[in-house]
Each structure stands twice: as structure tokens, then as C-alpha cells.
Amino acid sequence: MVLAEHPNAASPVLSHFSLKGKVAAVTGGVRGIGLAVSTALAEAGAHVAIIYTSSKNADEVAADLAQKTGVQTKAYKSSVQERATITATLEQVAKDFGRLDIVVANAGIAAHQPAEEESEESWSKMMGVNLDGAMWTAQAAANIFKKAKAAGTLEGGSGSIIFTGSVSALLVNIPQKQAAYNASKAAVVHLCKSLSVEWVDFARVNTVSPGFIDTDMLTVHPEEWRKQWFDMIPGRRLCDPNELKGAYVFLASNASTYMTGANLVIDGGYTLP
């Protein structure tokens, strides 16, 4: 097994970040971090399939993104925790766009409750979306990449799979109690490492682990929690989702052809003290 090389490593550096002509799929791509990622990949030149579960404005989001960037976009309703469903969706994306080069497994949920009160249902739901969903999304992407590699149609010889992890994979957040969420994200980070080794011949697999991002997922929390977080973040602020765009483009592009199994932590220094 050999990790694919950069097609022209001596070319001007900005060309390394171009995604022109490539096709990307982003789960949970309609809002929050996922929307920022979908936008970033489109702005870098990729055609984008936005995959969602329940958003009512997905088609409008896709159309607006296409109008602003000039690339092809399309929204697909799917369920990442159902292996057959997300597999069929990604296969349809590859068929509709004629190829698939980049898959971002971003869909995720969060919940907070004391571990001694965790129900079987809530635990299963958390793992089903955050961990199982990441695995089934990555597996479907890998099989598409592997088939394309065998057929000689995988550009550059490698696809790119990117997981959205979390700083919660590396530490225990306080004051919120979220053992299930933390465990699911820790598993995603190690899943990334494992898959990067197994699939090195046809895919690069990396993770982005954000800290506290200014999305709807955080605005529902009590103000006293937010104040405590600010005291613990050296950067003393939340992250705008758009500040993550460069990291995802980097991992999706030829700028990172020798990077696989990595976990990029973007947290304003939160995990450092």
C-alpha cells in the first residue's frame, strides 16, 4: 500500500488548495459547521452535495450556494445512522455528479445529562448519529474511492474523508455533563486513525476537532456555562464557524497529500492549559 503523491508538488502553493472540478459531499451540511464547510468547498471550486436529515430549507441553501459560487450543488435527504441509506445516498451523489472525491462526515448531535441517568435510548441515539453515522458515511465513501481507484478514475489516486470531531474527544468539558457525547467523539478520532491506516491505498482520512463554535448548538446553553467557558478559553471568545473553512479545504485538497490519520484541533487554546 502506498499513499498517493501530490501530482505536482512544485507548483505554486495556492494551486495546491484548489478543488476545481472535484465533487464533495457534506453530511449535516445545511447549517452550523456543516454549512461553513459546504460553502468553503464550493468557494474552492468543488461541486457540492449537501446531505441533511430534517432541515426544511436544504434545497434553498443549495441553490443559494450555487448562485454565489458558480458550482453545481444539490441537496440530498438521508440518514447517516442507517448504513444502507447513507450508502445509497453517496452512490447516488457519485452517479449524479459523475464522480466523488471528498466526503465530510460532519453530522452530529449533542445532549447533556448525568451519566447515572443516561438511558439506553439516549445513549444509542448519540452513538448512532455521531459514531455509527461517521463509520457508515466513511465506509460508503471508501468503497466508492476503492472502486474508482481500481478503475483508474480516482483523480490523484486518493479520495479524502474528513470527520468532524471535537475537543470533547480530548478532555472532559465542564460544567456540562456529557459522557455519551465525549465518548462518541473520542471514538470518532480513533476511528479516523484506524481507517487512515487500513485505507491508505485509496483514501486519506483526517479529523477536525473544533472547540466552542458559535452555532445554534451552543446558544441553547445557560449563560453561566458560557461565562465559565470564556474563563477557560485562552482566546476568550467563541469561534465563528467560518474560521474553520480553511482547515477543511486544506484537508480536502492537494495541500495535505502527506497527511492522513491526523486530528486538527481548532479551539482558541482551550485544550492547552
Image: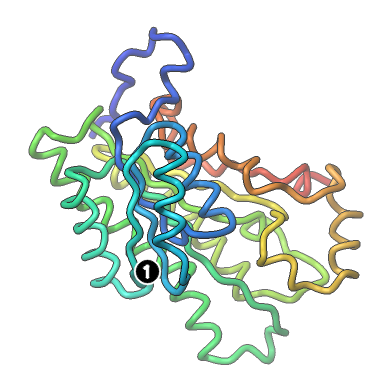
Residue at x-position 33% and y-position 54%: 74
Q: Where is residue 113 in the image (x, y as percent from the top left)?
A: 70, 83
- Left/right of residue 156 with respect to residue 132 in the rendered view: left
Residue 202, position as x, y percentages in the image: 24, 39
Helix, strand or loop for disc 1: loop
Among the 4 quarters of the image, the one containing residue 75: bottom left
Q: Is residue 26 above or below residue 155?
A: below
The 10 Å Cα crowd at callout 1, few under 14, some 14 to 19, many 20 or more, is many
133 vs 230, left or right, is: left
On screen, residue 206 above or below 43: below
State left or right for residue 94 relative to residue 238.
Answer: left
Q: Could you say which quadrant of the image residue 153 lies in? A: top left
Which kind of residue does numbered mark 1 sit on? Val
Answer above or below: position of 98 versus 89. Answer: above
Tell me how the rendering is colored.
rainbow
Q: Which residue is drawn at 48% across and 83% down?
A: 124
Q: How many marks?
A: 1
In this rendering, the answer to whether 249 lies above or below 117 is: above
Residue in the foreground of this view, choosing between 66 and 12: 66
Viewer-side residue, 264 vs 227: 227
* Residue 100 percent location from the top left of the image: 25, 44
Q: Mark 1 points at which residue?
A: 80
Image quadrant where residue 137 sits: bottom left
Residue at the image position 66 percent from the left and 54 percent from the top: 167
Q: Which residue occupies the foreground of this view, 66 or 200?
A: 66
Quadrant the N terminus occupies: top left
Residue at image position (69%, 52%) is 211
